[in-house]
Image: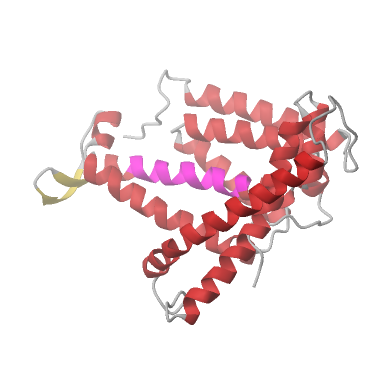
C-alpha cells in the first residue's frame, strides 16, 4: 500500500528548495486563493499548481485517497451552499438567468452555477500546493529553517514531529482498518465512497486514543532528556537559502501582488462575465 502524505526524497528542484521557501509559497498562494473570486486568476493558479505538482514527481497513489475525500466533502459543501442560499450567485452578480425551475425558491441559474464553479476552483487551486508542501518537505530541515528565521526551536521541533507523525498515524489507521475488516466491515473499493467513509468513522476514536498514548510517550521522553532547557540548539539537517529559493519567493510575491491587483481592479473581488 502506498504511503499517504509521507515525505520522500527525490531529485527535483522543488525538493531542493528550503522548507521556509515552500512555506512562504504555500501561505501566499492560499491567501490569494481564499481572497479572490476572479475566475481568470483562479484558472491560472489552478494550471500553475498542477504544473508544479507534476514537476514534484509525486506518486498519484500517495494522494489519490486524499483527493477523493476532498472531492466528496467539496460536493457536500457545494450542495449545502445551494440548499441554504440558492440565490447567492444572483445577489453577487446582480442579475438572474434561470435555466430551469426545480421547486419553490430553488431555480438553477447561470449565476449560481458560475458562483459554485468558482468555489470549486478555489479548493483545487490550493489542494495541490498543500499536498506538494507536505510531500516535498523534510520535517527536520523545515524545523531548522524556521529556527533560522528566528522562530523558537521548540515550536519548529513541534512542527517537525507533527509532520513525522503522519506516517505513524497512517500505520495505526491501517492496522485498525484491517481489524475492522476482519470483523466483516467492508472498506474496500467494492463499496461506494460514502459507505467507506461511514465505516471509517468507526476508526476515529481508536485512532485518537492510540495517538494520545503515543503523544504522552514522546513528550515524557523529551522531558526526561531536558528538551527546551537551553535557548539555542544545533541542527543536523539545515539548508541554506539558494538562488532558487530567492527566485521562488520573488515569483510568488510578484504573482500574489498581480493577482490581487487584477482581482480588485474594478473594486469587486467577484469577476462578472454576465
Q: Position of residue 145 (x, y in %)?
A: 81, 34
- Is residue 139 shown above or below 37? below
Q: Residue at x 67, y 27 (%)?
A: 253
- Residue 122 among those drawn in magenta: yes
The furthest residue to the top: 267
Residue 232 against residue 110 in the figure, above or below:
above
Secondary structure mostly seen in magenta is: helix
Q: Is residue 264 left or right of residue 25?
A: left
- Residue at (69%, 40%) from the top-left corner? 159
Q: Nearer the viewer, residue 216 or 232?
A: 216
Q: Is residue 36 left or right of residue 15?
A: left
Q: Residue at x 38, y 45 (%)?
A: 117
Q: Residue at x 67, y 59 (%)?
A: 168
Viewed as shown, does residue 170 lie left or right of 186? Answer: right
* Residue 153 is one of the magenta-drawn residues: no
Is residue 195 placed above or below 159 in the rendered structure? below
Q: Quadrant of residue 72?
A: bottom left
Count how many numbered circles sit on residues in the image: 0
Q: x, y (%) of residue 21?
A: 75, 35
Q: Nearer the viewer, residue 130 or 231?
A: 231
Task: Tell me, yes or no, if residue 109 can be seen here.
Answer: no
Measured as percent of width and height from the top left, residue 16 is found at 83, 46
Read off the magenta span.
Answer: 114-130
Position of residue 35 measured from the top left corner of the image (x, y, whole percent): 48, 29
* Rendered-image quadrant of the N terminus: bottom right
Q: Is residue 270 above or below residue 158?
A: above
Pick whichever, 217 or 78, lies toward us.
Answer: 217
Quadrant of image for the C terminus: top left
Amino acid at each position: 500500500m502506498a504511503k499517504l502524505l509521507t515525505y520522500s526524497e527525490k531529485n527535483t528542484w522543488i525538493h531542493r528548495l528550503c522548507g521556509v521557501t515552500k512555506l512562504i509559497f504555500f501561505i501566499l498562494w492560499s491567501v490569494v486563493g481564499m481572497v479572490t473570486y476572479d475566475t481568470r486568476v483562479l484558472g491560472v493558479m489552478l494550471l500553475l499548481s498542477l504544473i508544479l505538482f507534476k514537476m514534484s514527481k509525486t506518486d498519484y497513489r500517495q494522494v489519490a485517497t486524499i483527493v477523493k475525500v476532498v472531492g466528496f466533502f467539496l460536493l457536500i459543501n457545494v450542495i449545502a451552499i445551494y440548499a441554504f442560499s440558492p440565490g447567492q450567485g444572483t445577489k453577487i452578480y446582480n442579475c438572474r438567468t434561470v435555466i430551469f425551475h426545480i421547486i419553490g425558491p430553488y431555480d438553477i441559474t447561470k449565476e449560481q452555477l458560475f458562483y459554485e464553479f468558482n468555489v470549486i476552483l478555489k479548493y483545487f487551486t490550493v489542494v495541490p500546493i498543500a499536498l506538494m508542501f507536505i510531500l516535498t518537505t523534510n520535517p527536520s530541515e523545515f524545523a531548522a529553517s524556521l529556527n533560522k528565521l528566528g522562530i523558537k526551536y521548540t515550536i519548529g521541533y513541534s512542527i517537525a514531529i507533527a509532520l513525522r507523525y503522519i506516517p505513524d498515524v497512517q500505520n495505526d489507521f491501517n492496522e485498525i482498518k484491517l481489524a475492522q475488516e476482519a470483523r466483516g466491515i467492508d472498506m474496500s473499493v467494492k463499496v461506494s465512497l460514502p459507505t467507506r467513509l461511514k465505516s471509517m468513522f468507526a476508526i476515529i476514536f481508536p485512532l485518537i486514543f492510540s495517538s494520545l498514548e503515543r503523544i504522552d510517550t514522546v513528550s515524557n521522553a523529551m522531558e526526561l532528556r531536558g528538551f527546551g532547557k537551553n535557548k539555542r540548539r544545533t541542527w543536523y539537517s539545515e539548508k541554506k537559502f539558494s538562488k532558487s529559493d530567492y527566485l521562488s519567493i520573488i515569483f510568488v510575491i510578484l504573482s500574489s501582488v498581480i493577482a490581487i491587483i487584477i482581482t480588485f481592479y474594478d473594486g469587486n473581488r467577484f469577476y462578472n462575465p454576465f
